[in-house]
Image (spheres, helix red, strand yellow):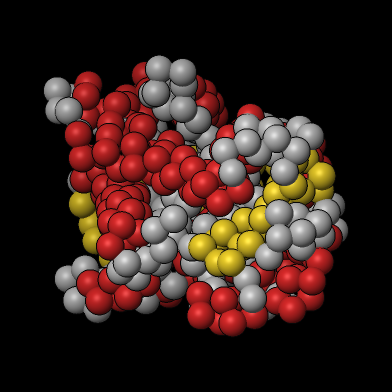
Amino acid sequence: MKIAVIGSGYVGLVTGTCLADLGNDVMCVDNDQTKIEKLKQGIMPIYEPDLEEKVLSNRQENRISFSDSVKEAVDFAEIIFIAVGTPTLENGEPDLSSVEHVSKEIAFHMKDYRLIIEKSTVPVRTGNWIKQTIKDNLAHGIEFDVASNPEFLREGSALSDFMHPDRIIIGTDSPRAVSILVKLYETLNAPILVTDIESAELIKHCANAFLAMKISFINAVSQICEKTNADIMKVAKGIGLDRRIGLDFLQAGVGFGGFCFPKDLDAFINLAFKLGYDFKLLKAVKEINHEQKSNFCFKVEKLLGKDLKNKVIGILGLSFKPNTDDLRFSPALEIIKILQDKGAKIKAYDPKSMSKAKEVLDEVCFCKDPYETAQDAEALLIITEWLIFKNLDLIKLKKIMKRALIIDGRNIYDPKRLKKVGFEYYAVGRGENI
Ligand code: UGA
């Protein structure tokens, strides 16, 4: 099939690349000309495992091309995905101006039937608004359909998530659109749920909100664990083995970050409010997530003494989760800011996000590896659970630190092992009431 994906950010680029890998002819479009030029040269705008390799191999097979022209995309493809950004405005609502602009451009250039698919995360009822926008700007008599096909890709495992989805949601009232999309996705062998547009859009809101709720639930329980000597890892496993609850997304820590959960929660709370419903549950999810970071910093203060002035603290992990260089709404940024405000001197290391971190963090000493970060530090904080942090040489680490203190915000170590090596070790919700 001939497909265009408009918006070559994380969602658009992964979607386009995977659709090309399934054997389709794909054109990825973006209005950022520098990004398109770089993509043409094989330079990726983001780090995502396997992305570069797949883009290059599909380019070699002439299945993927890049352009900055929506007109070119509309001429080229029958199926057009809209995957442009929908950042949050100051009033908490998502900015749909790019979606609107692209919809108008598609309408303007359309000469024949096109299926337009909403892939960006948008508020429920945007699909029908896109339909109306296209209708209002279209030359008379041209047929088109609009469908919602939300994505459930996780950064760090996006290509694998695309190829092995738990389900595919197709929201449309058009049988023609259903048959095109079923054909497009049939090789993935995943359950396909066909719904109306509004339900498909709401499924996306609910999936992210529910996952965020699971994380905040377990983080709230971690606070109780610290007050009762219980171990959150065991509690999470004990409840997660109940198939009705499930083991996933019950990892307590410093809270969730990233561009999706915080933004999508705000958008859902806002949307509900506009519809006349006060979504208190989701407000609490947000609040608990915020508290989790301040509680973690409070623990650091309790262990190092109230005055953090000139205390050297090493930070391992800056990205909002492992296997990505994405720093947006990363817990590390918030934690570093709180500690710096209290006078601490921060050293930091992250395997992938160092160059991005240098742009957004001030007065941080960026180190070449975890050991340089730990050198002379009075505490080492684990903020992102990168695999390499799980396999550090603990004896070496202990020797080079000023104080052998690890405060683990992701519960990556076995407390007994750490204590045996001679570390003071504190994690999240693992019984230690400081
Ligand atoms: C999330 C969803 O998982 C995807 O399904 C969705 O498509 C995506 O948002 C989106 O809307 O685009 P993502 O933000 O990439 O994906 O990452 P997650 O793996 O969901 O992690 C989000 C945050 O939650 C991270 O900061 C992670 O450290 C934290 N987390 C996750 C926990 O603190 N505990 C857990 O048990 C799981």
Please provide percent x and percent y for residue 256: 45, 49
Q: Quadrant of residue 69?
A: top right
Tell me what residue is drawn at x 50 percent, y 30 percent.
Answer: 87
Q: Quadrant of residue 329?
A: top right
Tell me what residue is drawn at x 54 percent, y 74 percent.
Answer: 413
Task: Please name whichever residue, 135 or 328, is drawn nearer the observer in this view of the structure.
Answer: 328
Tell me what residue is drawn at x 25 percent, y 43 percent.
Answer: 202
Vertical placement of residue 76 versus 135, above or below: below
Task: Please name whichever residue, 419 or 173, is drawn nearer the observer in this view of the structure.
Answer: 419
Please provide percent x and percent y for residue 53: 73, 68
Please provide percent x and percent y for residue 405: 63, 62
From the viewer's perspective, tell me whether residue 344 is left or right of residue 259.
Answer: right
Task: Please name whichever residue, 123 or 416, is drawn nearer the observer in this view of the structure.
Answer: 416
User: Which corner quadrant holds the C terminus?
Assistant: bottom left
Residue 217 at least partly seen: yes
From the viewer's perspective, tell me whether residue 390 is left or right of residue 214.
Answer: right
Task: Please name whichever residue, 422 or 163, is drawn nearer the observer in this view of the structure.
Answer: 422
Tell me what residue is drawn at x 44 percent, y 44 percent.
Answer: 295
